[in-house]
Amino acid sequence: MARLTDYKVLTFDCYGTLIDWEAGIWDALQPLIMSGGDSGVTREAALLAFAKWEAHHEHASPELRYPDLLARVHRSMAESLGFETSGALDEAFGASVPLWPAFADTADALRILKRHYKLVILSNVHREGFAASNRKLGVTFDAVYTAEDIGTYKPADANFEYLLSHLKSDFGLDKSDVLHTAQSLRHDHTPANRFGLANAWIDRQRLSEGGSWGATEKVETMPTTDFIFFSMGEMAAAVEAEGG
């Protein structure tokens, strides 16, 4: 059985894994929700709508930069939830990524993991948005590959083809060196299975114990996972224990 310390690089999803995108999304939706008075829209319903419309627009318009895509998501959410929106509200939501907070355990965990691995980001956001988030993460990543660089959004095969190609050309790393580390079953673990990548599930929503899907669209078939942790802090502690 593989050990965590058998790998040379951790490739990360960022949003949902390192950055608390659900808190960020919910906060960024408040101007719309407040405009509707006592609408009764719950956080769970709003995140479910986000999951649906983000998946739709990422598939329909992979050429869009993430702020523009988020603006379309916001408009679609507003219409589906019965709100009246505006271009200004849509654009403000699209520009909200830099405001999304990091999980409390992320920076300390990444500093520990940096001692054991190369750290690489594979994210669906734009370069500028990730740069703002990176200031909250406490480490310098060895490489950052974004949807803006690739021209498609995960879970598209092109994103993982780009990742593996660049890990080889930039660092001389092979697929067997990679442990893909992520929260999202749809965006990350399902395609990781397709590409034969070892994977660590950061199951912050405790889906493995029957928790909520939150802002991530459900998958029909559960992917396999090599490791499961409920936080980045828990993963970092496990790596330290293995590494002595």
Image (cartoon, rainbow, N blue to C red):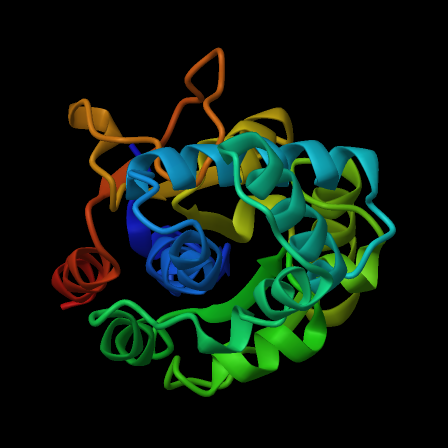
Task: Name the residue at 71% across, 49% down.
Answer: 72
Which quarter shows the C terminus? bottom left
Location of residue 54 in the rendering, given as x and y in whole percent from the top left corner: 61, 41
Q: Which residue lies furthest to the top in this view?
A: 220
Task: Name the residue at 61% across, 58% down.
Answer: 122
The foreground one among 130 and 66 is 66
Location of residue 224 in the rendering, given as x and y in whole percent from the top left corner: 40, 23
Task: Name the residue at 62% across, 25% down.
Answer: 194
Give the left or right position of residue 131, taking residue 207 as reference. right
Q: In which quarter of the image is residue 77?
A: top right
Q: In this view, does 142 lie above or below 13?
A: below
Viewer can see residue 162: yes
Give the left or right position of residue 170, taking residue 201 as reference. right
Which quarter shows the N terminus? top left
Give the left or right position of residue 169, taking residue 138 as reference. right
The foreground one among 5 and 202 is 202
Q: In this view, does 40 lie above or below 128?
A: above
Viewer can see residue 172: no
Location of residue 51 in the rendering, given as x and y in whole percent from the top left corner: 51, 36
Q: Quadrant of residue 110?
A: bottom left
